[in-house]
Amino acid sequence: MERGLLWLPLLIAFFWLAWQGSREFKKVEAYRIWAENFDRAKYDIYAVLAQKENEMTWGKPTVKGIVDLKTFSLNDVENINLLIDDNPINIDELPQKATKIELEFVLPEASESIRVPFTEIPLAGEWGKFLQKELQRIEQQAEK
C-alpha cells in the first residue's frame, strides 16, 4: 500500500506528460496541413507565420487548428524590424538571450504595425533577413 502511494505521483506525472505530448502533436499536425498551401512557413508555440508570394498570413496554433488568422501584403509594408524585448536591433548582430522576440511589420499608417512573436532569436533573425530581402525585391519591382 505504501509503495503504491509512492508511485502514484509518478504515474500521474507520466499521464500528464503523455496528454501534453498528444496535444502538441495535434497542434503540429494541424499546422502541417495548413502550411501545405504556402511557399514558406514557420511554426512555434506562440505563432505560425506563412508566405505565399507577397501575402503573409499568421495566427495562433491550437489543438483544433490555426486560429486568429490575419493576412497582409508585403506590398503594404514599409519596414520590417526585429524587436528584442521591445527594442529594434540589427539583424546581423543577434543577442544570445531575450525574454520577448517579435518580428514587426510596419505599415504606412504610422501608428499601425503587426508583431509576430517568436521563441528563438536565430529563427526570427533568419525570417527577418529573408523578408527584408523580399521587401527590397518588391520595392525594386515597383520602381521599374
Image: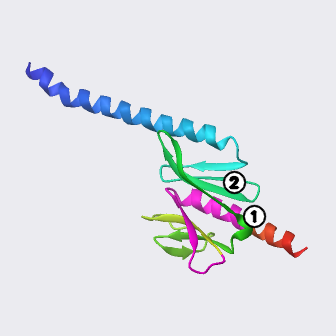
Q: Which residues are magenta?
A: 108-134
Q: Residues within 10 Å of mark 2 (few under 14, many from 20)?
A: many
Disc 1 marks a residue whose amino acid type is Glu
- Which secondary structure lies at badge 2? strand
Do callouts 1 and 2 mark residues in contact (Cβ within 8 Å)? yes
Q: Is residue 5 left or right of residue 124?
A: left
Q: Quadrant of the N terminus?
A: top left
Q: Which residue is mark 1?
A: 134
Q: CA distance from mark 1 to mark 2?
A: 11 Å
- Decide if residue 37 is on the left or right side of residue 116: right
Residue 126 point in image, percent of width and height? 64, 59
Foreground residue among 80 and 58: 58
Query: Circle 2 sits on which residue?
Result: 51
Q: How many dots with numbers?
A: 2
Mark 1 residue element = helix
Work out whether mark 1 precedes mark 2 in sequence or the reverse, and give the earlier one. Answer: 2
